[in-house]
Amino acid sequence: MNKKQRVALIGCGFIGEVHAANLQAHPATELVSVADTDSARAAAFAARFAACAASASQLFNDDSIDMVLIASATPTHADLLETAARAGKAIYCEKPIDLSLERACRVVDRVLHFNVPVTVGFNRRFDVSHQQLRQQLREGRIGAAELIQMVCRSSEMPPLAYLQASGGQMRDQAIHFFDLLRWLTDDEVTEVAAMGAALALPAIRDFADVDTSTLLLRLQRGGLAQLDNARRTGYGYDERISVMGAGGMLVSESQQQRGVTCYQNAQIAQPGLLPDWFSRVQATYYAQLDAFVRSLNGETVSDLPGLEDGLKAQAIAEAAVISLAEHRFCAVEKVSL
Amino acid sequence: MNKKQRVALIGCGFIGEVHAANLQAHPATELVSVADTDSARAAAFAARFAACAASASQLFNDDSIDMVLIASATPTHADLLETAARAGKAIYCEKPIDLSLERACRVVDRVLHFNVPVTVGFNRRFDVSHQQLRQQLREGRIGAAELIQMVCRSSEMPPLAYLQASGGQMRDQAIHFFDLLRWLTDDEVTEVAAMGAALALPAIRDFADVDTSTLLLRLQRGGLAQLDNARRTGYGYDERISVMGAGGMLVSESQQQRGVTCYQNAQIAQPGLLPDWFSRVQATYYAQLDAFVRSLNGETVSDLPGLEDGLKAQAIAEAAVISLAEHRFCAVEKVSL
Amino acid sequence: MNKKQRVALIGCGFIGEVHAANLQAHPATELVSVADTDSARAAAFAARFAACAASASQLFNDDSIDMVLIASATPTHADLLETAARAGKAIYCEKPIDLSLERACRVVDRVLHFNVPVTVGFNRRFDVSHQQLRQQLREGRIGAAELIQMVCRSSEMPPLAYLQASGGQMRDQAIHFFDLLRWLTDDEVTEVAAMGAALALPAIRDFADVDTSTLLLRLQRGGLAQLDNARRTGYGYDERISVMGAGGMLVSESQQQRGVTCYQNAQIAQPGLLPDWFSRVQATYYAQLDAFVRSLNGETVSDLPGLEDGLKAQAIAEAAVISLAEHRFCAVEKVSL
Amino acid sequence: MNKKQRVALIGCGFIGEVHAANLQAHPATELVSVADTDSARAAAFAARFAACAASASQLFNDDSIDMVLIASATPTHADLLETAARAGKAIYCEKPIDLSLERACRVVDRVLHFNVPVTVGFNRRFDVSHQQLRQQLREGRIGAAELIQMVCRSSEMPPLAYLQASGGQMRDQAIHFFDLLRWLTDDEVTEVAAMGAALALPAIRDFADVDTSTLLLRLQRGGLAQLDNARRTGYGYDERISVMGAGGMLVSESQQQRGVTCYQNAQIAQPGLLPDWFSRVQATYYAQLDAFVRSLNGETVSDLPGLEDGLKAQAIAEAAVISLAEHRFCAVEKVSL
């Protein structure tokens, strides 16, 4: 049996908690220490998960730590990534690498020199249904992907403060689907056109954000994709991807709650969609952790998103931001560094 | 091309009208004359369908008539069947042959001597979805039928007067499914157990009828079937048949209306079931007519229900009536003549 | 009761036949005469539908004709429209008015002076399911339309000759959805971005056509719409429209065939989508005819697409053509005349 | 906060393991000790769950134990129940109390004198979907239950040895639905008719068992119910309950796996049903444990099945066994003691 990975977690917020619980539950990981800029929070968090609280620098200098999980605020990712790499740790880093694509490129460039295992938190690759979709595409069940439709609609508007720090809908929400599109099709996006509007929360116009957006994406091998994003639906969490080829269509559907169907008069009322994004994606965090740990133990795991995947998805997001703002098509290579 | 069948229709009520429209629309039939005990009604009806009004005896004596369609009141079926057979006509007779199984047997016995083509109105055999079900069963897609579930639930309670003359839920409503069961499985029912109650319209207890009933039916080759019947649902017309075998389950589903689905809050509301039985079965009348006419023109048509099918379904209904009344299992052979 | 409209039909091709059958079936119309550039074809067609064959000019000069239905080849529409208007006939004209938007505008300008009732063949407005969608939107069931997704995918590639004369996917196929979008939302399209490719039939690149395309459309009141078009699917006819507002989502779904569901192993196989576009839209031709006839008889019918609707949908198509060709966003007002 | 219940588990088989994991996970229970007739197995089991291995008598004599969970072989249930009650423990006892209804009645009679909290393992009452069904029935959403359809079909035939000791399909499998029926309707079953056959595994005829059965059940307030049971389906685990009343129908559906839908040619293939019964019911064990613990802590918990519920469901099973064997209707009161 493989040794347990000794893990340090940086960031004790909501997503840090999700990771901590998974690290505790996974048979091949051990949550050893946690750090947070708020040391009282780190201490309470450490107590809950039977780990030690430490400073970030202590973690990096602790030779018994095998792996660092970066779940802190976005602006800290780049530095932490580089320091962790320099310290020779395996790294699971939440997306994005940095809101500035330029800075992200620079840090990736340096991190790659240290040659440590790194995965970036594009956890939706580990959605069981999306994985089946990819598998069936690769088996050629419908031929090459010609027309892809992706929907990503959250049920509830996030708080304004979250949105202000998020980098905007393209960099924060749509980016997962830029990654999914590349991964599902094994292809690259060459051109983007985007339209957006702040319909649900007009206040976000102050920082040039949108809450409703639609995108066209052209793929290198000729396929065409659409994506729409919404920050609140009024009907639950709606995430679905369909791919059409010459031989048919494969759909990874939105997921319904389970419950009672009511037949009454001229209507059949079924249980609605899952209530929120977390209900859908919760299991994917564990699955990505598991895949990463298996890869550290020598297994070949093909779906793990790496640093280059992080940069490529961010480049598409930058192109989308330009398209949104300037009402023009934007070639992805123009924004790539 | 085959000659057109010249058809006389007896009975100008609701179902007579359905048949008249089909006879008019079918390229190989011609509605020549119509009869009804109410001669004014027959005259008006004849005018609408560009046919002649006549008495029943005139029809039978008219050598130019090839086929008689009996759609008159149930108590008249037996005599009309026999007279039509004696006159050498091809006969499409609405079910049942007679509410008395004994009388039905006697008349069938005599009619068979005349060796004319006869079909009995078990039109649900011509439901496209049920036909696919039968086809797939015969192809062995799931192996032998082990467990069959049939649901027959009408949306609206028929008028009391209709019910009083109907012979009861077993002979009037369930009988179609006794026939479907035999036809779908190519098997015979040996034993019946039935429970029933007058829940929707207690007044029908006065003539020992029920509006809600559940049945178990044992098949000769070992399969088991269930049937439930209701006279009103509160949610549209619900007719469905599922068959389980060792290799899976085939379902001919209830049919929904087409329209808009509404996703709202924690609910997905779809269009309801078809509003009434006629929406579902309307097309089957034409299909049975077409099959009968094709058989008259020499084509081999395997699904046509004949006189023996009529008797066998009625024998099951009689067994069910006994089971309902006496709270006991009833062997079908005990009531067969 | 209203008098029957006496109708002349111009064009005896596939769609002419559809209209002829409807004119024959409708209780308030009478198909009196038919014309076609191929007079033998017109004669045979007239015989089938118990009408007279005539030349177009004869039709226009026949004062007993109330209404002209123009179902001839697209390049003839403009002249026939004008002549019919000049002759004071009510006009049902198949779309488009003319492949040249400029010419279409000129002829509409002239036709409007004659003040005759005209409807343009945007028959999909009469799809029962789309009509329910519009009705529910107008009732405010989900609030204002924020995000609209439209899918229009034909099952089978049309013949190359058809495509060559069609004006391209935007003017021929997508145009119905440009009209539906305006009609469903009671709003106007201001800006279009389109991507397209010839993936199914590369030969159509020779005349700059595409068979797969994706579009973004911005609405004046702020809503965003997507549309995708495909000329062949490998899985039947896929037409669906969903509209999201603050209060939920309404969907007019793709329609399935009816038949048997098979549960087997780890799969549930249902009957597929309707086999082709005509299975879905057939009933809409009759419904538009009926609405037009009712309007001629004085009823207020709000959904009838008029000449301006024809021009507006064509303007969106022109903008889409420009966007496709030039990889840029295109404002609709720039192409409107 | 309430004190933790200190729990002893008897029986270290499959279901004992399920309970042990739940006891470990539940914040208000502590698995203290485990017993099994195979003491080596108990020791290994205890080690896995950080508990002590003990003999049953040690458990009962340990005053620090608050609650006993009986998950041992069926023939031991009655004695263990009585001893645990005599020792004053709270008891969670797997069903059935005893395969002999007479013995079960005697032991219940004695256990009731000790007045300890007892729940019997009718865990399907804690299926979230069935609970919604009950809730909506109680709210009067469709009026009184008139027609109930229950399906209970396991995907895989259990081993012959299991079947031999099981007491037969009525006492082992159908019994859960006898309890669900009483609980969902708040009504009592008065009469049963059952048909059965050994179609999947004829060898079980040797001990008069069946693997496929259909039942009719009459309820005291007039409703009628159907149940069918199968031991293997060929298409996954199929458990569903529908209830019709005057106001419509409520359905707690069979549950599908999540995954990819494939549209191809004339077929739409969805992910199949859950693979086995355990996938469906797993969460109900925890939910029943939780409800029981909450009731021990003073909360009013209405759904907990008690000893009388155990007896009543068994009485229906006995009536069904008689009906199956003797081909006759059987009144439940005839078998009740």
Image (cartoon, coloured by chain):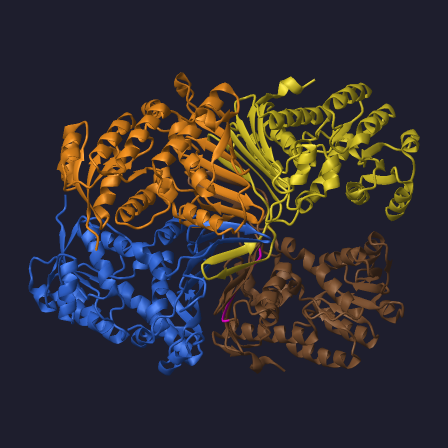
Chain colours: A blue, B yellow, C brown, D orange
Q: How many marks?
A: 0
Q: Where does the magenta region start and end?
A: C146-155
- Asked if one can make out residue C152 in the rendered structure from this viewpoint, the answer is no
C254 in the magenta segment: no
Q: Residue C56's spot in the image, x, y percent?
A: 83, 67
Estimate the x, y position of residue B33 in percent, counting from the top left: 89, 39
How far across and how far down the image is residue D194, in percent?
50, 27
Q: Is residue C293 above or below residue C307?
A: above
Q: Residue at x 86, y 26 (%)?
A: B83
Q: Residue at x 73, y 65 (%)?
A: C291
Question: Where is residue A230 shown, x and y percent of the image?
Answer: 42, 68
Instruction: State which quadrant residue B321 falls in.
Output: top right
Q: In this image, B268 relative to A103: left or right?
A: right
Q: What is the magenta segment's predominant secondary structure?
A: strand
Residue under the image location 16 percent in, 57 percent down: A49
Nearest the viewer among B123 and D91 is D91
Indicate whether B299 appears above or below C124: above
- Viewer-side residue, D278 vs A149: D278
The quarter of the rendered structure image containing the C terminus of chain B is: top right
